[in-house]
Image: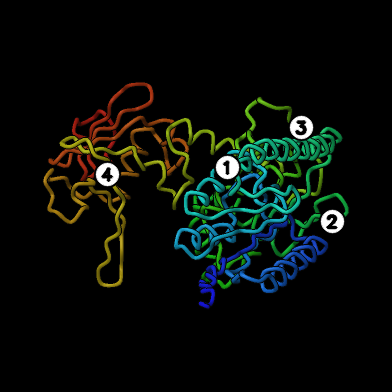
Amino acid sequence: MAGRLEVITPTSVGERLRVAAYVRVSTEHERQLSSLSAQVSYYLHLIESTPGWEFAGIFSDEGATGTKRTGRAGLADLMALARSGGVDVVLCKSISRLARNTTDLLEVVRELKSLGVSVRFERESIDTASAQGEVLLTLLAAFAQAESETNSANVKWGIRKKYADGTPHSRHPYGYAYQQGTLVVIEEEAVVVRRLFNNYLAGISPEKTADMLNDEGVLPRWGREFRGKTMRKWLENEVYAGRVVCQKYFRPHLATSTVKRNEGELDSWVVDGAHEPIIDPALFDQVQEILAMRRQVGRARTPSGGSMALTSKITCTVCSKHFHRRTKTRSGTSHKFWWCYNATRGQGNPCQAPRVREEVLKHICQDALGLDAWDEEAVITGINAITISPDRSVCVELAGGSIRRYQSDGHPSVEGEVRSVG
């Protein structure tokens, strides 16, 4: 009798799933950081103890908001791993941990899905690999975004309530420390702020002041060196005059990092005498008048060695380009001169523009305005334009419309019209 033949097929052992986890906390407070640590430990144990799973990494962001993707290095690293084919499944505690912005959330999930990566949200029991996963995800993400917007509105209300009471939101501008609800002067920093304002009034730019401080080894509060760009902003910061403007800036949308200056869109509050000033209010207002004047004549930049009045004022009669300031050094001595832009490019002198010494130009301006000494502001407001020709003639157009013509050797081209200079 023939025996029964039984065929036993080999059991297929499926490939191990490469599983990663993403965790996020929105602040760096100790309590939330301990929560982050607990999440990391939980997912590490879960992945390594689950049969068929292979650990692909845990990605985290500390102190990062969920309302936008920017500034979240952990999420960026996770997406990079997915694009390289290094993960199959991503675990996340909840939808709000991945994103509180519906658009960003769906963009992330859909990109992962297109790469063959599914996301599993534990709290909501959603797996994006399932057919109904994305529909439910969209609804819940909208709720998460609404919750975030509500929380943001509550925080803004609290801040604006403080503003209405004349209390500034906590901040630490250079020169001050925020202590017990008020700004207290830090004298060693206040010395630097006073020097900046006094230098500006003396015609020294913030960039030059920054260079001076750096050369002297003076250290800023943060970073290695002072920067002129930063110090320029100090010149317009009313906090140094003991004044506080509440809600000077605002963020139009929750999901954007763009901050806009408040130009009447929202209420604002001005508090004079809110704290001890570093700069006398009268001196501060004087600086603001000079800044406003420079903007009106097309110069938002601050002065540089008393020559700012000539910047963008002198043009070439041949090419209409501006003359630029240059320095010539010979035998240990140097002098400043102005030359057409086309001649300073190192490609010859196509306009045949002359070099005109700065002291000659200053003497011409003084003569045209009837000044006994150089006055930066008088030149800015009293002279509209200066043109220089290849024959070294200088034409000065005054604010009233009259014209004065000179030769750059210092003598007027029309004898008796103005007195000689040079």
Mark 1 or mark 4, which is nearer the start of the sequence? 1
Task: Give residue 221's quadrant in the image.
Answer: bottom right
Q: Nearer the viewer, mark 2 or mark 4?
A: 2
At numbered mark 1, what does the secondary structure look like: helix, strand or loop?
A: helix
On screen, residue 1 above or below 240: below
> How far is disc 3 from disc 4 in space, using C-alphas?
44 Å
The residue type indicated by label 4 comes to: Phe
At numbered mark 3, what does the secondary structure look like: helix, strand or loop?
A: strand
Circle 4 residue: 323
Q: Nearer the viewer, mark 1 or mark 2?
A: 1
The residue type indicated by label 3 comes to: Trp
Instruction: Give the number of the disc on residue 179.
Output: 2
Instruction: Give the number of the disc on residue 106.
Output: 1
Q: Are marks 1 and 3 in contact (CB under 8 Å)?
A: no
Estimate the x, y position of residue 330 in percent, counting from the top left: 25, 68
> How far is disc 1 from disc 3 in space, using C-alphas?
40 Å
- Left or right: 107 as drawn, with respect to 376: right
> How far is disc 3 from disc 2 in space, using C-alphas?
21 Å
Mark 3 or mark 1, which is nearer the start of the sequence? 1
Instruction: Give the number of the disc on residue 269.
Output: 3
Label 3 packing within 10 angstroms: few (<14), some (14-19), many (20+): some
> Looking at the image, which is closer to me, 264 or 22?
22
